[in-house]
Amino acid sequence: MIKSPSTIKRENKNTSLSADLVIVGGGLSGVCCAITAARAGVKVIIVTDRPVLGGNASSEVRLWVLGATSHMGNNNRWAREGGVIDELLVENMYRNAEGNPLIFDTILLEKVVSEQNISLLLNTSIYDLEKKGADKISKVIGFCSQNSTQYQLSAPLFCDASGDGIVGFLAGAAFRMGAESKEEFGEKFAPNAEYGELLGHSMYFYSKDVGKPVKYIAPNFALNVTKNVPKFKSFTAQDFGCRLWWIEYGGRLDTVHDTELIKWELWKVVYGVWDYIKNSGKFPEAENLTLEWVGTIPGKRESRRFEGDFMLTQQDIVEQKPHVDDVAFGGWSIDLHPADGVFSELEKSSCNQWHSKGIYGIPLRCLYSKNVSNLFIAGRIISASHVAFGSCRVMATGAHGGQAIGMATKICIENQILPKEIISSNLIQKLQNELLKTGQHIPNLAFEDENDLAKKAMISASSELILSELHPNNLLQAITESVAQMFPISSPKKQKIIIHPHADEETVLDIELRISSKNGNYTPDVTISKQSIKLQKGRNCLPLEFDFGIIENFEICYAFLIIQKNEKVKLQYSDQRISGILSVFNTINPAVSNYGKQEPTEDIGVDSFEFWTPKRRPEGKNLAMKFEPAIEVFQAKKLINGIFRPTNQPNVWVADINDREPNLLLEWTDYQEIKEIILYFDTDFDHPMETVLIHHPENVMPFCVQEYSIFDGDDNLLFHTKNNHQSLNSIKLSDYVETKSIKIVFKQKLDKTPVSLFGVRVL
């Protein structure tokens, strides 16, 4: 029994904790920062004011996680972010392909609490801090309403991943809020009055069919949307969740201090929308639907943006400018919205998305405060102009930057330096290399490790794919939209491609061969050859010859064999799926403002180009065709080139499709002491793996090897698994093994998909 006498005043429990890094904010940028740092040996405290992790991706808001892949609606091939965010998305796909946001909550919680170097504080709001001198934070102070405890959290380094930048704000870090003028950075897409200075908040709802009629009586604060919401006719009974991202408001208000006001306005709209759907008589299909869930906090887009030593601008995105300190990448469109959101009278769309031709780098200088020396900034508050923010604000991009901060913390702690000194101390390459090692992709960089025993080994494989033909499945499909087969070319030579189109009548088929004007991009904007070929009725055999020798300054790249739309002609497709080989279509995806071609009607500083995008499985099959000479780019030597995804080439070893148990052999002239083996598998970096609403066709990507075994030189089994689904496998042996060779035996699970592997490292 506790019995306390009366007193004038009491204080709450006060707990002091310390670590190497304190992260404020439990969204994906904070989570990925924490896990990355913890695995690198950094002691981390992550504190969030919410009861679950994930921020806008959590079950409290339920926005799908996206980044450079953009729903597969742009030209950024194989652009899903790597490292920890990839691990989380792949795990969610394995456990939760149906997209239940509650399950994603548990995956994030499990990953965080599994790390011994992480201390997690939920339901704890940071409201104050202390500084040591003018430019350094010494501690942050928060309060947990659930256990009536005040926390004082000390560290040499802090990361603000809070979304609104509460730590940076309290610490006096330089920030901006609102849009810059065209003149400040020369950004031609700087918004006008219609688009305002800020993006608003959104709130979603879910409905459920209960199998019997359900009536609905709206609360008295619900809006009459037919009178108050100009776009009320856009609502349907089928849409729910973040497909209703355009239920947005607040772009002309203070998106920090007016958040509660904005929330109420969004509630009025949501409950008014449901009243309209249930009671207007226009939606008989909604009779058995009930309102299952409505968000209780809004999903925030924009508030403060903090200034670093570099500010990302529109030109960095559109021109894909490289930076010497790039540590992450982005690729979402420049996505700005009308300031009035759902109340906008504009005839235009609820967003204005302008894509670049490929991904762009994000430098470390965007990820720390320019005037608070021990403060990293992560997520949507990084150093970017309002226009550039329109692209880099999305969650997977923010998570990728958070990972860079987590690893940068390791560099700072080991060398007793501050964030900006990573560059001045010539440690940026070390940071980049540490990130690449974890599977994090950085444009134009390859991983290097002088201690990697795989680089010193003679590597051989039981087979290597020599791609002479993509075999037909004997099903004919009309060319109702223009289609292209992407394939790698490795030297300036003549290439013959044979296809067999079937014509319903005599007609002309237009065929082109294109490449991208920028190596590493997948926008086919340079035409090498253009042919108009007469077809006879029935089956035709077309031997197409192309000369790559005419390409100036030739580099290894992808070519696009483009067959233009002709509904009188049918093509055969192949059931073979091969790592680094894709078909793409000149199709539309209105969800990301892809209407086949990007054509700005005025000079706003973005490019005009066509979209060539893949289709989701089970569609999106390769075109059936023969290659003479055969394509030989899938050798085992690619396993040590330090790039763990397709870029300007597949960068992958692929076994022969008939080799059902292929093996790799790594041999050394002398005995080696081996403790760890790291393998980089293909989990289809072209698949965006949205966390909610999209029902994905598989739990494990078809290219990913699920079963393999590792043996030493005496055929002793060192490791075996049947259940791999992750991109990166790190096999830590219980003790050092002395051996002159390692053999890895893989099992091919799918008949039409050969075994493949991006990389192998041995330590």
Image: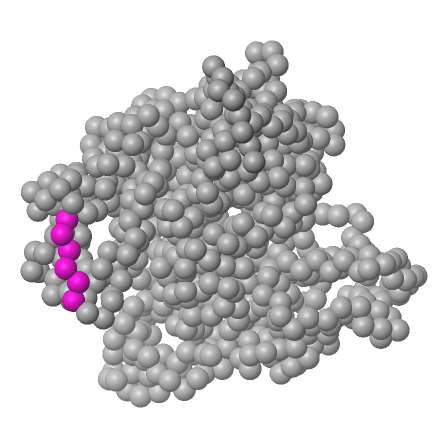
Q: Which residue is at a point 82% across and 60% down the rendered structure image?
A: 734
Is residue 228 visible in this depiction of the protein? yes
In the rendering, at what x and y percent does residue 35 appear? 61, 44
Where's the C terminus, which quadrant?
Answer: bottom right
The kind of secondary structure the magenta stretch mainly shows is: loop
Residue bounds of the magenta highlight: 213-218
Q: Is residue 58 magenta?
A: no
Q: Which residue is at a point 36% across and 79% down the rendered structure image?
A: 571
- Is 147 above or below relative to 484? above
Seen from the viewer's position, the closer of residues 1 and 149 is 1
In the rendering, at what x and y percent does residue 449 appear? 75, 48
Colour setup of the view: one colour
Is residue 72 visible in this depiction of the protein? no
Q: Is residue 422 left or right of residue 297?
A: right
- Is 502 above or below relative to 623? below
Q: How many marks?
A: 0
Q: Quadrant of residue 476?
A: bottom left
Q: Which residue is at a point 87% across and 62% down the rendered structure image?
A: 737
Seen from the viewer's position, the closer of residues 559 and 48 is 48
Q: Is residue 216 magenta?
A: yes
In the rendering, at what x and y percent does residue 226 appear? 8, 46
Q: Which residue is at a point 85% across and 73% down the rendered structure image?
A: 716
Q: Is residue 496 left or right of residue 707?
A: left
